[in-house]
Image: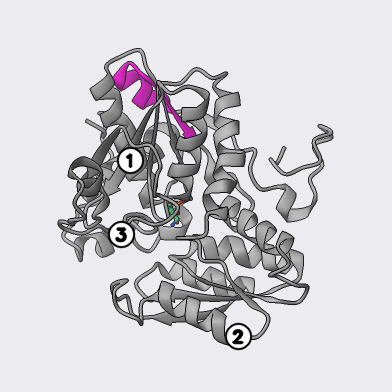
Amino acid sequence: MGAHSDGMSTGITEGFSGAVGGTPLIRLHALSALTGCEILGKAEFMNPGGSVKDRAALGILQEAEASGQLKPGGTVVEGTAGNTGIGLTHLCNARGYRCLIVIPETQSAEKIGLLRSLGAEVRTVPAVPYSDPANYVRLSGRIAEETPGAVWANQFDNLANRRAHYGSTGPEIWQQTGGRLDAWVAATGTGGTYAGVALYLKEQDPRIRCVLADPCGSALYSWATDGTLKSEGNSITEGIGNSRVTANLEGAPIDDAVRIDDPMALRTIYGLLWQEGLFMGGSVGINVAAAVETARRLGPGHRIVTVLCDSGDRYRSRLYDPDWLAGRGLEQPQRTGTALIP
Ligand code: PMP
């Protein structure tokens, strides 16, 4: 049952919005056996728009409606790596708004094509740093300002994003584990998922370790470990990592941080496919590999929860295409009888 259904346990949800949340928590058997820990993945790819970002999109729209900022027939504008835009477009269709999405042209063709199929007005722009006024996030803010009747979702700095996770993802994890968990591990894009869940879980039990996972090319690992925003290398993962501390991440508890490189993330998603039957996107490789590293740091006997953000379907032409990988100096993992995830 969706987190936003009527609460009467009928199993019937209020439209698309009511079907958001209430996702399963999946035990990852091979990795649990490998580490002697219990590794659990919150199946956010099972949201009706296909990703963890449906929750943020719904929370942002509900707050904008409640404040009177977003009026019937209004326009929602957002800068997004794809998933927030996909969630927003579904929700705008279901709730009677127009949706305008600004997305860096470096994002997967699957996500950009899907946004167009869903009916968003899509503007692809060159990927430039946040410091540049032409950056997709900053541009989306200006477009919202200049468009009559428009609101800017502003997922990076609008705290409605993390409140959505504080109010749904966190409580669901707490309930599904019966309050028995030792660590929460997640990478951050806006920080909404990581921070909302971390803030909720720490309030329930301050002993739960909150671990920030980060891809190469992001400045958050160095920020979390030594306080400086420095990035090294790059990553083929999408939707995670940042060069700055967003309002959604600010003030979130961070007990530890783990950096995962692309070869490790790739071995992890292929391992999930072949060993668990789960077809996952790249950020899941970072999350699950960081959960495994956390298991190693904690030792056997612990229970660790992470997020399965979206499906591999959104990256078939990239993460699952050997030629695309080879073009980036990466080898497609090969299926053998032995465990892929060291
Ligand atoms: N994984 C994917 C595939 C995403 O699109 C996002 C959102 N940008 C995240 C992880 C991170 O979620 P959040 O924005 O809540 O930090």
Quarter that holds the N terminus: top right
Q: Residues within 10 Å of mark 2 (few under 14, many from 20)?
A: some
Q: Quadrant of residue 296?
A: top left
Taking 284 as reference, is 36 above or below it? above
Q: Secondary structure at mark 1?
A: strand
Camera-near label (2 vs 1) is: 2
Instruction: Name the side, left or right, on which 44 lies relative to 97.
Output: left
Q: Position of residue 113 (x, y in %)?
A: 51, 73
What's under tag 2, amino acid-wise? Thr
The tag on residue 293 is: none
Query: Could you tell which of marks 3 and 1 lies nearer the N-terminus?
Result: 1
The tag on residue 212 is: 1
Q: Position of residue 208 (x, y in %)?
A: 41, 24
In the image, residue 278 lies in the stretch drawn in magenta:
no
Q: Determine contact: label 2, label 3, CB under 8 Å.
A: no
What's under tag 3, amino acid-wise? Arg
Instruction: Name the side, left or right, on which 85 lies relative to 261.
Output: right
The tag on residue 147 is: 2
Mark yes or no: residue 96 visible. Answer: yes
Taking 51 as reference, is 323 above or below it? below
What's under tag 1, amino acid-wise? Leu
Write down the region rendered in magenta. Answer: 28-41
CA gap, disc 2 and disc 3 = 27 Å
Please tell me which residue lies in front, 104 or 139.
Answer: 139
Q: Residue at x 18, y 57 (%)?
A: 231
Q: How is the image coloured?
A: one colour
Question: Circle 3 is placed at which residue position?
Answer: 244
Q: Quadrant of residue 60?
A: bottom right
Q: Residues within 10 Å of mark 1 (few under 14, many from 20)?
A: many
Query: Could you tell which of marks 2 and 1 lies nearer the N-terminus?
Result: 2
